[in-house]
Image (cartoon, rainbow, N blue to C red):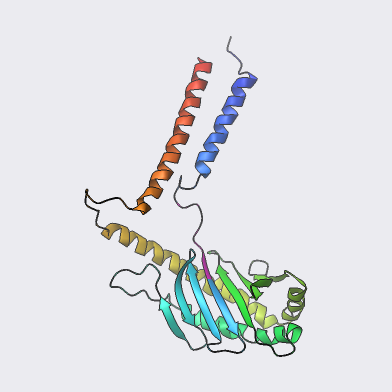
Amino acid sequence: MARTPGPKFIFILLLLAVLLACVCAAPGASGRGDSPSLHYDFNISSDKQPWCMVQGKMDEEKYLLYDCGNNKVISMNLLREEGKAIHSCEGELGTLSNMGNELKPLLADIKREKYADGAPLTLQVRMTCHGSTSGSLEFSLGGQRLLTFHSETEEYKADDSEGERLKKKWEKYDDLSKDFKMTLKGDCKELYKCWVHRKTELETTAALTTVPAPATTTPTIASAAPTKTTDGLETWAIILNVFVIFITLIII
């Protein structure tokens, strides 16, 4: 008569399944854990020149500083290859310049609501491109977020009473919401695809052209990271092997 697995045997199988799930979810077990990120930080000033500046970041690496008011690139340095200049993606500067022009009139609404005395201020806006057909805008003042706009919901979401006042006002601007939606779902998506492709291409080229260090060269600190990840995975493998052997013994 065949033996029926007891509660102890079932518990061990469940524990093994949990361990396998942990290994699969561990960072480095299957390449990059997070998808690439692309965002642009705008500073729209009411009292100084240049009135529009934007910082572009790919995976939190600064690659672009652009004067969107005067259409002037200050710096461009994403994964710069030695001896080769890195140019912006097609339509990128035009998209950023247009967004700056859309944001500039919004300063008047903020001044009327909160700074009626005409005090100078800088509107900070983060445009994030999520990679699919979506994106978002975060509007802040003095480092404090007021409200956000999401292309998926096509709605504003206020963070405080000041943001709520602006939300009600901006919801009346039908063209503004439409322009935000078109930029986030169209231009933003194309810029994301362009920079992810370009960065992958540059990283692949750099890896293929890197000359291995001589055997006598002292290893750099950067090389220690892969070793730690490998050791971690080996530890999990040992634990799993122990459980597999244990379960096999129970079955026998």
Quadrant placement of the N terminus = top right
The residue range painted magenta reads: 32-39
> Is 115 above or below relative to 242?
below
Q: Is residue 198 left or right of residue 216?
A: right
> Outermost residue toward the top?
1
Q: Estimate the x, y position of residue 102 in percent, counting from the top left.
A: 61, 84
User: Any magenta on residue 33?
Assistant: yes
> Is 113 above or below relative to 21?
below
Q: Quadrant of residue 208?
A: bottom left
Q: How many labels were placed on the picture?
A: 0
- Name the one closer to the observer, 55 or 223: 223
Q: Residue at x 63, y 71 (%)?
A: 138
Q: Is residue 133 left or right of residue 171?
A: left
Q: Estimate the x, y position of residue 58 in percent, counting from the top left.
A: 47, 66
Q: Estimate the x, y position of residue 72 in percent, counting from the top left.
A: 45, 85
- Name the one closer to the observer, 231 or 72: 231
> Is 171 above or below relative to 194?
below
Q: Residue at x 57, y 35 (%)?
A: 18
What type of secondary structure mainly makes up the magenta span?
A: loop
> Outermost residue toward the front?
218
User: Any magenta on residue 94?
Assistant: no
Q: Residue at x 50, y 17 (%)?
A: 249
